[in-house]
């Protein structure tokens, strides 16, 4: 489902909050609260396109985190390694991303 959203040029940016994924009466998951989402078009120029790609990875990491918590057998070793690895550059990008997210949430 998240990859489908990403293929349409959107990043949710707040999937790490469990309340943003609801289980419907039909037993299917639904993503809600799109207030922090961003579109690829908004971030198409350098260096913002790198930040956008980081938001995409954060969405995927949020899903990996939930899977590790609730069904760890579904997470392969490569995926687990990507989730746990934090380079210095990534730490810097995460800090910038958090500041940008806070700014966007204040604006929204």
Image: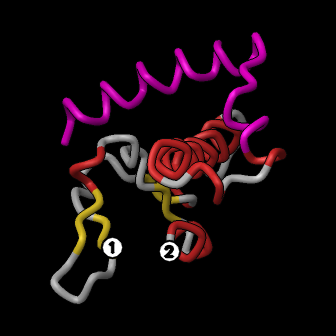
Quadrant position of the C terminus in the picture: top left
Residue 77 image point, x, y percent: 81, 45
Between 83 and 3, the one nearer to me in the picture: 83
Q: Nearer the viewer, mark 1 or mark 2?
A: 1
Outermost residue toward the right in this view? 78
Q: Is residue 22 left or right of residue 49?
A: left
Residue 60 image point, x, y percent: 58, 51
Q: Is residue 75 above or below residue 87?
A: below
Residue 43 visible in the current orientation:
no
Rendered image: mark on residue 90 = none
Majority secondary structure in the magenta region? helix
Residue indicated by mark 2: 1
Magenta stretch encompasses residue 98: yes
Element type at marker 2?
A: loop
Q: Are marks 1 and 2 in contact (CB under 8 Å)?
A: yes
Residue 40 visible in the current orientation:
yes
Q: Is residue 60 above or below residue 80?
A: below
Residue 46 image point, x, y percent: 72, 38
Q: CA distance from mark 1 to mark 2?
A: 9 Å
Between 79 and 68, the one nearer to me in the picture: 68
Residue indicated by mark 1: 29
Magenta stretch encompasses residue 94: yes
Query: Does label 1 or label 2 sit earlier along the sequence?
Result: 2
User: Are there few (<14), some (14-19), or many (20+) residues within 10 Å of tag 2?
Assistant: few
* Residue segment shown in magenta: 80-108
Residue drawn at the location 49% of the way across and 63% of the way down: 10
């Amino acid at each position: 489902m998240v990859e489908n959203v990403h293929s349409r040029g959107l990043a949710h940016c707040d999937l790490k909050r469990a309340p943003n994924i609801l289980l419907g009466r039909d037993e299917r998951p639904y993503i809600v609260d799109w207030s922090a989402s961003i579109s690829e078009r908004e971030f198409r120029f350098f260096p913002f396109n790198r930040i956008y790609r980081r938001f995409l990875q954060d969405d995927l990491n949020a899903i990996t985190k939930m899977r590790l918590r609730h069904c760890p057998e579904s997470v392969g070793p490569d995926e687990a390694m990507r989730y746990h690895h934090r380079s210095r550059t990534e730490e810097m990008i995460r800090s910038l991303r958090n500041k940008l997210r806070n700014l966007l949430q204040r604006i929204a």
